[in-house]
Image (cartoon, rainbow, N blue to C red):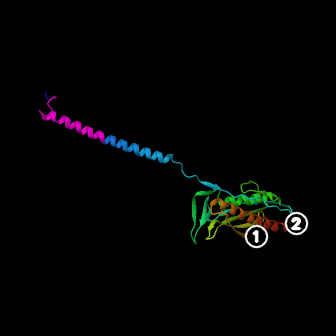
Amino acid sequence: MCGKLWRSSTLCFTEPKFSKEKAMGFRKITALLAAGIALTLASCSGLSRPSPKIEHYSLEYALPAWEKLSLLPVVLKVNRFSAAPQYDTRQIIYREKPFARDAYVYHRWRSTPADLVTYFLSRDLKFSGLFTGVLPHDSGREGMFELEGSVDEFLESDLDDAWEAVLTFSVSLLEANQPDVSKRILFEKTYHAKKICEERNPRALAGAMSQAMADLSARVITDVHDALKGRNSKL
């Protein structure tokens, strides 16, 4: 009787109330699940979106010719250069105003400025044909003379009328086996170059920086050769 007449007793009256609460609970759970699925789908769609591509740049220039300089019977080792803190990174640094330095987000150097200068200077010395041997910094062999240095500037300078590549590094030439420390350093010199970028973009900066490196590398090789040729008779 009670099962048919819903309002005939208290016990029978509580059954539809309990069913209503269960239905409300199910609706809440369903809503929460739907919200969770929506959030998951939204996050998945964000993850599937491709991130912007990072462009990498290096230096590129032809080897200089050295026809008028003589071969020296010396073995030279090029030690790894260091770099000023703000340039000890693969990020491309640029300057828009005094005392400010910023970096590109999606454009980077393939290697750090210190490694780029070390490699290209070592390469150019080796292929100049002016020395019996040129050893890279990671060689296990010892050189008669060592070249070391630091990168002081390696940046894009944004001028009002143009952009330019700025490259500055310091170099020291040392006699490796000289016991007298005061006589070990043959010369110390700072090299500086600025080259105008053909366009206002990172690729043009890489081209201008390549020109700057080519010019400074040629000057370093000439100075090293001049410093060592006077010692040729003592070797």
Task: Indicate left or right for 148 with 108 as reference.
Answer: right
47 displayed left or right of 209 = left
Of pointers 1 and 2, the one earlier in the residue sequence: 1
User: Relative to 17, is 123 above or below?
Assistant: below
Mark carried by residue 38: none
Disc 1/disc 2 C-alpha distance (Å): 19 Å
Q: The residue under label 2 is which amino acid type?
A: Ser
Relative to 29, say whether 54 is above or below.
below
Q: Badge 1 local density, few (<14 within 10 Å), some, or many (20+)?
A: few
Specify whether residue 24 is painted magenta: yes
Which residue ends up furthest to the top in the rendered image? Answer: 1
Q: Which residue corresponds to mark 2?
A: 233
Residue 24 occupies which quadrant of the picture?
Answer: top left
Q: From the viewer's side, name the closer residue of 31 and 76.
A: 31
Q: Secondary structure at mark 1?
A: strand
Residue at 63% across / 65% down in the picture?
156
Query: Which region shows up in magenta?
Result: 3-27
